[in-house]
Amino acid sequence: MQTPLYRGAPWCVLFRRETCPRVPLFVLTLLTSPPALADLNGASRQAPAPSASHAVESAMEPPRPGELTPPSMLHYEEAPIPPNVALTAPESAVLSLTVGIDGKVNDVQVVKAKNPHLDEAAAKAAAKFVFTPAQRVKEDGTSEPVAVVIQFEYWFQPPAPEAAETTNVAAVVNQPTSAQTNATKSPPPAPKSAGPLETPDEEEVFEGVATVEAPAREPTKRRMEKTELVRVAGTRGDPLRAIEVMPGVGQSGGEPIIRGASGYESTVFLDGSPVPFLYHFGGLTSFVHPRLVDHVDLYPGNFSARYGRVTGGVIETGLRKPSDEFSGMIDLNLIDTSLLLETPLSDNWSIAVAGRRSNIDLVFENVVPDGAFDVVAAPVYFDYQGILQYAAPSGTEFRVAAFGSKDSLKFVFAEPSSENAELRGTLRGEVEFHRLQLLHKSRLGDVKQRVQLGVGLQTLTQEFGPNIKAYFDIYEFDTRAEWDLPLGEKLALVAGLDATGQYLTGAYRGPAASTQEGSLADESSDTVVVDEASITLLSPAAYVELRAAPLPGWLLVPGVRVDYYDQIREVSINPRFSQRYSLTSSTVIKQGIGLYSQPPIYHEAYAPIGNPDIEAYHSVHTSLGVEQQLLAGWSVDVEGFHKYLFNRIVNTPQGEDPHFINDGEGRIYGVEAGSTYQSDFGLSGQLAYTLSRSERRDRDENWRLFDQDQTHIFNLAATYELGAGWELGTRFRYVSGNPVTPIEGSVYDTARALYFPLYGAINSERDPAFNQLDVRVQKTFTIGSGYIAAYLDVQNVYNSANPSGYTYSYDYQTKEASPGSFFFPNLGIRGKL
Amino acid sequence: MKRTDLACAVTLLSVACGDPLVDPQTVIGLRVLGAQLTSSADPSVAHLSPGEAGTLRWLAVAERERNYRALTLLCEARPSSFGVPQCGPRFLEQQHEGSTTEDLAFDFVLPASFSKDQEWLSFVALCEEGSPRWNKHTQRFSCTSGDQPVTAYYQGTSTPNHNPDASDDTLRFNSKPWPAFANPSCETEGLPRLKRDAVATIRLDVKGKDSEPLNDPSYAAATNEALTYTHVATTAGLSRAFSALDPDAQQRHFELELDGDEAWSDAQEQRLGTFYLVVSDGRGGSDWLSRHYCLHK
């Protein structure tokens, strides 16, 4: 991934929970967003792959009486191409499907007879589709399942599918029948709404076109759609917080912890571009307006060769297209205020702009203790996004997106800290980035092409007292070109090039850097200075991936990725392989194995504070799992995984020159299970459980636990539509406490008038388990074509303390547990034109 | 995507404004407050070159007289960036028996075999019960009694430096000069007195040129030394433990408060308290002074 240059910046060694001081609630509540503030209490579902999305649904609208929610596909059936058909161009079969209240297809009719052989094959396959039933909103606001007739256009076409293009997931090759053709299941290049169809008696009519997403190239891809993302409570609809309800994702107040990997070992993409920052103020809320997000995909491991430069997991966030009608939305709550406007500009052009600003500074001075410090600039964050979209009927798309974010604060302390004389003077922090992204998708004959370019600027300034000061200006780009080529009936090839580059200028004075994981609080005793440095980082990569379908329902995906890391002058070659096999129409077995490499963080390879001879480190991912559709609306996914990490970058024993060496290893293993349920009476929910162990070994030391090893991660989330516009959501979490390193004494540094802790074995103790209940209530008032929704999110309803580390006295002789979460109600109102 | 930068700052912010678990400005039990190195050739000099002789003096205090056994080590400093510095080969090890009313000091010669840039360390460990021991493998001290020793260290370099001089600064108690008294009691004439329901103001006016120029052209380097003052008292009620005079400070003085009501934790007619002030230049230069006061009803 594109490595944020400031990541792991040395000053952050100052921030460790083990020595977290007594923290005023106001600060944590408003700014640092501990885990409790990242809670989710709404329902969300783990989307099995393949899954369906619906072109006609809107995440924005509250339910209105009579409104229909289309059926959502749970199981897709491959249609073999009849032996007597040789496809030379895309062809489709337009079908009429009657989906019953049990989600099964009760009837299939060919609407437009084209090629009778293809029609028949498509009809046979479609009869085995399974959907969640369509839902109709009743007068009292509750929903009921209804049978509907939908039009479904089953495409057989040589090129790669549109859905794969938009979701970065390639399509599977269908049953081969001819040496000259291969067919993929995909939506049509330019889906069109179909008119109302004749429906059976007593059944409602659903109008629309269902689009079917291709199966993932990865063994496990977990998706949350926009409809789910914005209903997740506790995050105020924050889509990047919502992933925490998925199996394999740990409890974290900041960067996501995916399958026992450190946050910096995973990456987040926004429409294909890596994002430099994810959250305001380290974890309060993500920088993307939640109502612009179309979906979030999580690849917890064994991800495609398309992704590189990380050894953990990948999160891909897709922005939606601007609406084809003018609309506006405003959301006002205690934390921030946001505005979203979108409108079509012509038949092919549309635009959306959004912005958000925090409200923290409006109340900040009223909640801080008198005389604690002089507030020069209270904490403020803002972000913006703009999307200009062109979509031609031919399928060509062009998008210009601009987004950015800024966080800032400044305080001046009247006196040194009561416990640390070095904490005095000015505290100032400013982080901002701006990014422009160009995306072009087109077809070159049978080849689908996607080209994108992102350019941006990051700036960061930090000052804390007389001994810590830094600034960075980072100019960066990322680019990717990907081609999807059909190679025959059973084969398709994805080939791509991507590159990231950064030019950094900056300077730094502060504590010496330690590793991102396994380092100890207050560890750095040296001040290091980097004078006005400039660093150029360039990392080009190439990848190819083959998709083969030797048998119906069996998908093999071998691939290889080659990365070059300019800073360390090293090439990594990552072979990867995954496969999925449909045992039955409701059972899929999946498996993956692959090598994943990650370059060092820039400062780890930058002399004199790092080791210019440091190498990339690696991880071998293996996984085996099964997806099972139990009943309509109820699915289960169970997967075991193992990761072996080697060549890990660790500090030299005392941080002495060369500071960093490749002398660590790690092992992560476990099993994760997820189940989603969607009833026909307005209740939906998700259950997720992960049992895992994540360990590291540094140099020749003993195995120890990973900083955020969480043995048990249990999530239960549910949403119930009460009717009359009322919706109730809740979520319960139980997560094993994070490991902590005990402090066994201290030594006084007479020059700095500061005590240094003497640590026991690293991560040899644990915090108590985390448990928390969140509740969300929303009432929606429909006004014409718009609505107003009032909502109340209550995090940590029973005010569980959830201790997280300890607060120590100045000499580390006295300690008390630090509260990890707080009761926090957030009241908000949202309106849409 | 790690965004701990501002989180760091915000948490550090909370360090500064949170209430401490234990007031560091109140001396409870045995505690080391400072160390001062003086060159035998020039007592104002706070550095030694290889082959030079010097004296290392430790300030050990307690809320009342306490006896202890001490172990001091002098050793080569191992290269280290993290945690407590590590001791390499030792070139001096001394046992002491003393009390908090006496100086804890020893003379030594920095080995001539040291290279000019080589750093050295001195550790001290104090045990009230039993004797201190050093484990070179764990790099930790222990008391033979099983108690945890009070431990401190001083890191020496050959970088030219002078000790700040606290003796020329002016300390005032409720605006009046606050002189030192030898073996005072509450009956000592001129000793500042503080009533239980009163709050005293302690003020230090800094004189002289204790803040040496640093001549460091590197990024964000200070032009001069910052002077850090650690001030503690043997009774509660002192308003804070630290003050600082940074090079850009507009004022060359600071004030503290001593709250007699907080200090009056014992049901005594009167009580003698001791105020310690240690100034450090952050580079190993240090000096200190102490004053007494009387708390009464």
Image (cartoon, helix red, strand yellow):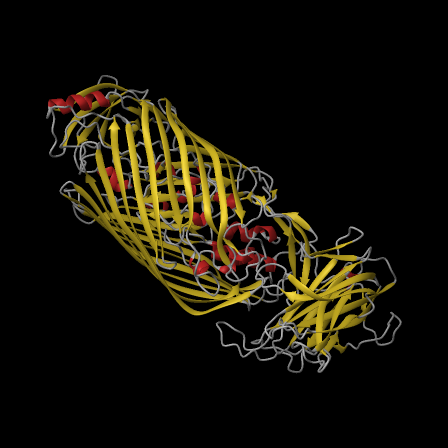
Vertical placement of residue B149 versus A158, above or below: below
Query: How many numbered marks appear?
Result: 0
Q: Is residue A366 visible?
A: no
Q: Is residue A299 visible?
A: yes
- Quick one: quadrant of the C terminus of chain A? top left
The one nearer the camera, A478 or A421, is A478
Residue at the image position 65 percent from the left and 63 percent from the top: B88
Q: Nearer the viewer, residue A520 or A620?
A: A620
Q: Nearer the viewer, residue A4 or A439?
A: A4
Q: Position of residue A777 (x, y in %)?
A: 45, 36
Where is residue A656 drawn, in percent x and y?
55, 61
Up the image or down, A648 lies above or below B106; here it is: above
Query: Where is residue A827 shown, x and y percent of the image?
Result: 46, 44
Front residue (pair A290, A590) = A590
Above or below residue A327? Residue B169 is below
| B118 with respect to B92 (left or right) | left
Residue A227 falls left or right of residue A765 = left
**Residue B119 percent across, percent down from the top left:** 62, 69
Reply above or below: A602 against A246. Answer: below
The answer to whether residue A700 is left or right of residue B60 is left
